[in-house]
Image (spheres, coloured by chain):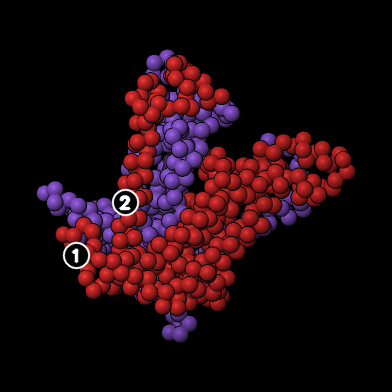
Chain colours: A purple, B red
Amino acid sequence: MFSETRPPFWLLALLLFPGVGYLLATFGLPLVRVVWGSFRSAGSLRSGTVSTFTLDNWARVLGDPVFLDGLMFSLWLGIAPTVASLIVALPLAALLQANETGQRAARTLYRLPLVVPGIIAGFMILVIFDRGGMASRLATPLGLSLPRLVRDDWGLGAIMASMWKTIPFMTLIISGAMAAISTDILAAARTLGASRATVLWRIQIPLAQPGITAAVLLSFIGSLGSFVIPSLLGPAYPLPLSVHMFEEGFQRGNWNLVYAMGTMLSVMSIAVLFAYYALIGSFTRRATRGRGD
Amino acid sequence: MTDLRHAAETAPSMPTAPARGAPRSHHARSQRLIAGTLYGYFALTLVAPLVVIVLWAFYDPAVGWFPPRILPASLSTSAWREVMADRNILPSAILSLVVASVVTTLTATLAFPTAWAMARFSFRARRAVEVFVLAPMIVPGIVVAVSLGEIFFVTGLAGTVAGVVLVQVVGTLPLMIRILAATLEGIPEELVLAARTLGAPYRTAVIRIALPLAWPGFAAGGLLSFIGSFEEFEKSFMVGAPAVQPLAVRLWSYLGGDILVLPTAAVVTLILLVPMIVVFILTERITREDVMAAGLGKL
């Protein structure tokens, strides 16, 4: 609860300044520059060309099949790991709630990938699933042969590496939301004959729903813009927009094209956010305020 | 409180004493199944990759370790010696720890006043401030990274430690503000008011009462900031490289280059994992899941 008294303006401005001011300078300004730059041609002092208004960057991003494929591949790399991780994270969160053997150890262990850099997650997938990796060495004696899983057309290796990072992140948020559900409700459902699966599906998931949607949204955005995992494990074609941005910018200096791609990624993220608000708006208020403990 | 569930399920046996022999109750059986599934999952996703990486770290270049073999024929410490001889690894590790500490401190300092204002006051632009603070979590980090990378290049901050710290705080600050605001909202107004009626000036009441009570928020937000900084790659890479290379960026030079040096990368991976796991286990006890999830749980 916050007090209803309105503070003096100077106090409010002073309090908000450090955080909001910092973000204005290091986030707001660069973002405006990205959007602005996406509509400008490249200017350079040396050759005397002046930057002018242009739609060329957008025409290239939206017209060149290389970038269109990149856009679709970015979306795929955002959606696929998020959906797959959710399918693992939901039962995992419920199991962690129900588990009584070595509770503290289990809770520490599942979160470990959170502290591991994405590049290491990629490296793990590489040593296990690349051709000649541990998975194929183990499968060969069993007479199995694995499909190509690293640098494959569907980006399965990149998806697995993203999942390895995303599952604990989702589980953290979802178990936080699930822990807020009163145990009395779960016990009541169980005594009335509901199986664990029914309790998860009919009670825990609906009540933890705000947490679940937040987890889905944040994971999607994280995977959408990830650079290191697809560049390590993804196919040579298509490349996601994040990798195109890096190559066009830092290797070719086409900054205005990079800005158009950046604006595109941001717009997609914000579109997802608004879709999320529209979807959730109707049932925001029902839910997890009442704490069990 | 939680015992209600046990009472409902296990009338005959005590919930705290799982039968070692044949499971006698439905409860004990289902607990075994749950624990089995969980630890099986951990074995598959954590232990198995770690074992493979440890084996690669002790790769013997004289003998090799080629595909049909599941276990290497011999082990050697040559990759370790190579990494220890590499004069860049230790500075990179120290740099990572220093940057992560500075980022965490700066984040907490910047976040507290803003979180206080958001948690305690109603003002007209409150919703707008909330959305703005949320925005950096919504816009993909790479967009900010390339743009700031270019701005820093012009202003001379590119390739400096300060630049890396500044760009990382963009990622950690929103989460810290949200977690702290959620924690501060939970502190009863009466405690601050009591201090005020007892004669404490407003500033003292905030610093002596609210700040210590917000400790769980600082712990959770601080841990996430520290981790976020330590494992961050994209922003540090685009602002700092090649002059400033924290450990995650250093690893890129072993993995992302044209030649993949598996044993060396495995050693650096293990070196990078150790401090993270130590920090993680130390702070695990003081961070509460509900506080950590509070900043993320609803957007």
- The residue most toward the left is A143
Q: Nearer the viewer, residue B126 or B289?
A: B289
User: SS class of the residue under badge 1?
Assistant: loop
Residue B137 position within the rendered picture, expressed as x and y whole percent measured from the top left: 50, 51
Q: Which mark is residue B48?
A: 2
Circle nearer the N terminus (1, 2) = 2
Q: Is residue B39 left or right of residue A237?
A: right
The residue lying at 34 percent from left, 31 percent from top is B33
Tell me if residue A56 can be seen: no
Marks 1/2: CA–CA distance: 19 Å
At a point 63% along the width and 45% down the height, the residue shown is B216
B241 up-or-down from A46: above or below:
above
- The reply to whether residue B293 is in sight is yes
Q: Residues within 10 Å of mark 1 (few under 14, many from 20)?
A: few
Name the secondary structure under disc 2.
helix
Horizontal side of A181 relative to A149 (left or right) equals right
Out of A60 and B41, give the one closest to the viewer.
Answer: B41
Q: Nearer the viewer, residue B70 or A120?
A: B70
The local crowd at label 2, few if under 14, some if 14 to 19, many if 20 or more residues have their Cα within 10 Å, is: some
Q: Residue furthest bottom?
A: A46
Chain of the residue displaying label 1: B
The amino acid type of the residue labelled 2 equals Ala
> In the rendered image, which residue does mark 1 sit on?
B66
Image position of B214 (left or right of A240): right
Residue A234 location, x and y as percent? 28, 59
Answer with the quarter of the image where residue A258 lies: bottom left
Measured as percent of width and height from the top left, residue A109 is found at 43, 46
Please identify the quadrant where the N terminus of chain A is shown: top right
Q: Quadrant of the C terminus of chain A?
A: top right
Task: Chain letter for mark 2, please.
Answer: B
